[in-house]
Amino acid sequence: MKSAYLAPILALAVVPIIATARPKHKAPPVTPPVPTVFLPDPAAVSAKSAVILDGVTGRALWGKDPDKAMYPASTTKIMTAMLLIEHCKEDELITAPANIKNVGESSMHLQPGEQLSMRNLLWGILLRSANDGCYDAAIHMAGTVPAFAKMMNDRAAAIGCKNTHFTNPNGLHDPKHWTSAHDLALMAREAFKLPLFAEVVKNNRHQIARSMNTKDVWMVSKNHFIGRDPTADGVKTGYTVPAGHTYVGSATRGGYRIITAIMKSDHWELDHDAMLKWAFANFDHLTVARKGDLVNDIAVDGAAQPKVSGTLSDDVQDCVPKGAASKLTANFEPDKVSAPVQAGQKLGNEVYSDGSGYTVRVPVLASADVAKASVIGKVAGRSPSFYVIGSSLCIGLIWLRSRTRRSRFYGKSPSRKGNFTLFS
């Protein structure tokens, strides 16, 4: 089996591996991963499942069973932290529920009724990996764990996760709680868009303020890359016996970020280091289009001019093997927009794709105000067929009116038969 597997790898072929469901527990439908290029030997990575994701474009650069349903352990907390930031203010006070001490394992030792600001609770969740902190956040935001799990799953689906089913906010083992390496990497990439998340995960220790248990204030991370590697800037470790060692990592070098997600690894630190080195050594970023570039010949219903121009709202970048050119091509998808239009209003999306399944949508904004056409302008803008039909109708009406007048003059209506000889 091993030789049969390595043969296509050495031939640089890409072999998508379809994930299978765990016994007794049906996993969500699995979609094949986006094709990767220059696939390294998976034997060099001890993890059962792993992925390398470009943080700028979201491209999967390499994967080893990246869409396989796996137990995430505490990497679950990436999603919990993201929701906490999105739904609460930094200074919002969160009160620990009466049953907070029932939450086991990794803990920041919250006391019933203890109040922490969202910001201080966030440090406990992401650095101390506090299970009780996650439960506190879940109850505050949703009222119950099942309701919060629904929030987690809905948010995962919204960012494109296909193989995720969360049942709790902290990753404590549940056979029905799973995700994939690819989905975890997508969650981390989305979370990095939040400045507070990025600020917290790049640190390995932080002192918080708390209203009770005031001697337990230092939150320390188990992510040994933070501080040791100056380019490391996240994200989260995890471990349970069923899950094994899990890790989502990030590093920024040369101005761009690479995200790794590693599931059930015997040597997660070695795996992460090898994956980072390979990705940064073998890929470059190219700017395909720039913010402000014109997109011409956009039709707007009811506009004073037949075609208008728009501008790209953001840069378009691609991550490609070093020395290669981008294969992205653009196609405009219009929104339903009618005049008048204000400058900066969205007209549609410029869609970039390369045929592999990778797609980027960039909003296109009106470059100037577009006035509504006047009645005369609307007529002037009609097609030639409009004038032919209109002219025919006018001639017909004039002819019919002329016949009506002549009929009155002779005192009777013209007959249907021989009417052309009546007035000869």
Image (cartoon, rainbow, N blue to C red):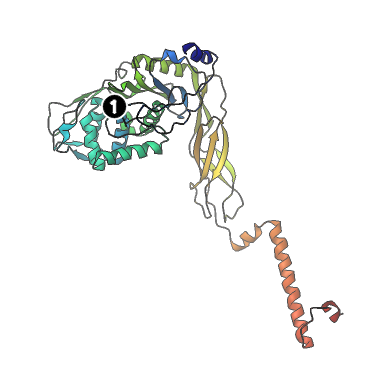
Residue 248 x, y percent position in the rendering: 35, 24
| Residue 76, quarter of picture | top left
Residue 52 x, y percent position in the rendering: 43, 23
Residue farthest to the bottom, as pictured: 411
Residue 377 x, y percent position in the rendering: 62, 59
Relative depth, front residue between 406 and 98: 98
- Seen at 24% across and 33% down, the residue is 134
Q: Can residue 141 be seen in this view?
A: yes
Q: In this view, does 83 lie above or below 414?
A: above
Relative depth, front residue between 289 and 164: 164
| Quarter the C terminus occupies | bottom right
Assess disc 1: are there few (<14), some (14-19) or many (≥20) residues with their C-alpha within 10 Å of its C-alpha: many
- Seen at 20% across and 40% down, the residue is 93
Residue type, label 1:
Ser
Tell me the residue that label 1 is attached to: 74
- Seen at 31% across and 25% down, the residue is 236
